[in-house]
Amino acid sequence: MASTTAVHAPAIRPVRGTRPAASERPRLTVVATPKTTGSSMPFTLLCTVIVAATLAALLFLNIQMSDASYEITRLQGQSQRLQEEAQALSETDERLGTPQELERQAREIGMVPVSDPAYIDLDTGEIIGETSPAAQTEGSPELAQVPAEVAVPPAQIYDEPSAYHGMGNEGA
Amino acid sequence: MTSSRRNGTQRTARSQGGSRRPRSSGGAARLRIPQARIGEPATRHRLLIALAMVAVLALSGRLIWVQGLDASARAEKAIAQRTVTRTIPALRGEITDRNGVVLASSVQRYDLWVNQMQVVDYRKGSKTAKTTGVEAAAEKLAPVLGWSVSKTEKALTGDAGFSYLRKNVEPEVRDAVMSLRIPGIGSDPVADRIYPAGSVAGNIIGFVGADGTALAGTELSFDEELSGTDGKTTYERGAQGQIIPTGKQETTPAVDGSDVVLTIDRDLQWKSQQIVAGAVEKWGAEGGSAVVYNARTGEVLALAEYPSYDPNDPGAADEEDRGNRSISNVFEPGSTGKLFTMAAAIEEGTVTPETEYEIPYEMYFEGERIKDSHSHPDQRLTLAGVLKESSNVGTVQASETLTPQVRYDYLKAFGLGERTGVELPGESAGVVHPPEDWTGRTRYTTAFGQGYSVNALQMVSAVGTFANDGVRVQPSLIAGTRQADGTIRPLGEPESTRVVSSETAETMREMMDNAVDDETSSAAVTGYAVAGKTGTAQVSDGTYTASFIGVAPADDPEIVVGVFVFGLNSFISGSRAAAPAYSELTTFALQNQGIAPTGKPGIQLENEW
């Protein structure tokens, strides 16, 4: 069939123009095999490698970025937890440092308010004022002895319900 | 014709290849020849190309439409779907005392809520669980919330899609609750305001409402400084809530509120409140105030009230206990007012501490009967003696050396009947009527502190004038706002007014020192010479106000302390109701401020002649 096609083609082409009949030309010519300038394989490979490398790099960068993003989320959570812990500790510190709590604890271990302090002048070494061993004084009789919890009660926020049995997450 | 001929030729050419069609078709057959479509590859090509072009055109048109013309709207829609904006709440600033001790701070809390319809799913698929649903959830949740199981169960049962389980829980409670993974239970972060020291300085600090709105005290008057500006962050969010790194991110950081630093010393404030409570309870009074004031700087070191309230739970207290009686309660000062009459007369040079007076129990001035507080035989007192004995008759005699206008000007100069300008809401200025209105008795009663009204802080500040060499400094409760670098930015220099000369101020201190016996007075402070004056006056509702205002140490004044007891049912002198509290409070304040005794005994002046 190849020969048939070969016959057909020249038969048609010349008809299109107003040229003389195709019979004037040689029907077939032997042409040299087109010279190949070596294999195209290396170039294709190079292109493939470049594309693959680009894609891989892009993928890697994307993975890195989303990893970093997850890491940020994790660290933000951790930072939040630590902040809350710090807050809880400072709240405890503030509660223990209130005058009401300090007085209560000081009295519990037997301390009394100083009634007659003495001072030392550091320049002269002189002792200013007279002092005496602390005594368990009852305070001025001219003032009513108002219990500390009544006169200046501790902050309401520290009255936690007594039925509070731990955090509930131990052994869970 | 051309075409037909060409067709004819074509046919001829084709026939060489052997056409299936019969050659002898006749005329009719010849006419049908153009229908031989097989002979049109060029047209077919063009058609195909045209079709492809149309398709390409359509696609590129669509591309341009989508990418170019319609792009922004679509892209916006897509971005809007994955973009979230979160508010970064600004933290309200702290209120601290003069030493930086926290009196009010904002903390993170959580509101726990429940979707009751989802709780039934708890442990539904579990084979090991004995109980499921609400019952199991309640058993787990009850110990964490500190509730009974039945109460918890009740809170979890129902068909509410959203109801608060418990508000304002601490982060650790919230974490424990969330770790139970009970379906339908969630939490929202909220900021809460706590006052660690409770009622200590509660009246000064004020409080905020449940939604964080400032409602009273410093919280209200310094709301602008305390509340910061909320920030916000906008980012594109992935399915797990993580930030899409290539997406657009925009963050406006929150500007936290500034810390406000008070001039109050927390320990001194606490002690003052305790002492005032003792004085009020001792005499069954309605309430009391105490002011500890640094006359040189105008700083109020303590402003105590009793009864007080806890700003953590302001609703539990009566509204009248939530304010500051020391600035809102106006009263006639009584005998402490004699100080201003005498200071004016000494400054004007019409009298000296040695000026001699004959003092009967009662005396008539232009028909007005003026008498002393207690009956006594005729006395021969110097001006210093008049102050020590607190004689009304003697004071009026001294005041008559001045015109009412001069006395009025001095009262105003001492800041009476004027707002002190202290940074708290709710101050009542009191009233000093102009001298034209000093008709009848008023002309004389104003000499001994009746017929005009003041508030407690005004009085302490006015007496502070004598402690600060005759210059009155505007009292202040706010040291300033704390900057990011930790330094305190003061609000500005307090206003100061010279009222009397330095010499007059010293004379007044000596007379006040003379009025307080180091050994016998109930106002005496061991180891220190103090200068002070008692006062008692009747209020229009029939009760009495007793007060004591004193300066210590008398020879080198550092602090002025005033104790006021309001609403006494009967006449109880300031020396009984207020002076003991003054003594206690000054003893503590001197220790607290580290003021050493000067070692000089109190001054004794000639009281009689």
Image (spheres, coloured by chain):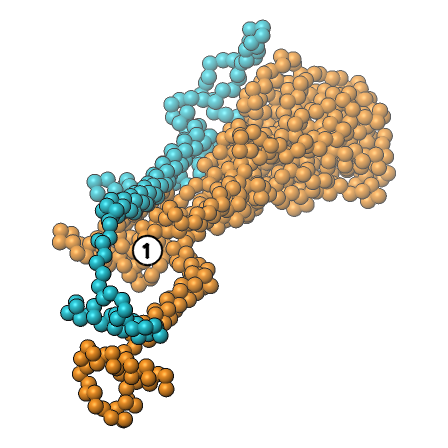
Chain colours: A cyan, B orange
Q: From the viewer's perspective, tell me whether residue A33 is left or right of residue A104.
A: left
The residue to which callout 1 is attached is: B114
Whether residue B570 is visible: no
In this view, B81 is above or below B511: below
Q: Is residue B3 visible?
A: yes
A81 or B383, nearer to the observer: A81
Q: Residue at x 77, y 34 (%)?
A: B413
* Image quarter of residue B36: bottom left
Instruction: Name which quarter of the figure residue B298 lies in.
Output: top right
Are there few (<14), some (14-19), or many (20+) residues within 10 Å of tag 1? many
Give the left or right position of residue B62, taking residue B156 as reference.
right
**Image height check: is B28 above or below B398?**
below
Percent across and percent down for residue B538 are 68, 40
Q: Quadrant of the N terminus of chain B?
A: bottom left
Q: Which x, y percent locates residue B509?
A: 71, 22
Residue shown at 81% from the left, 39% from the top: B443
Task: Name which residue lies at 43% across and 49% down.
Answer: B248
Left or right position of B595 against A114: right
Q: Position of residue B322 (x, y in %)?
A: 55, 44
| Left or right, residue B43 beside residue A119 | left
| Observer-nearest of B576 and B369 | B576
Foreground: A7 or A154? A7
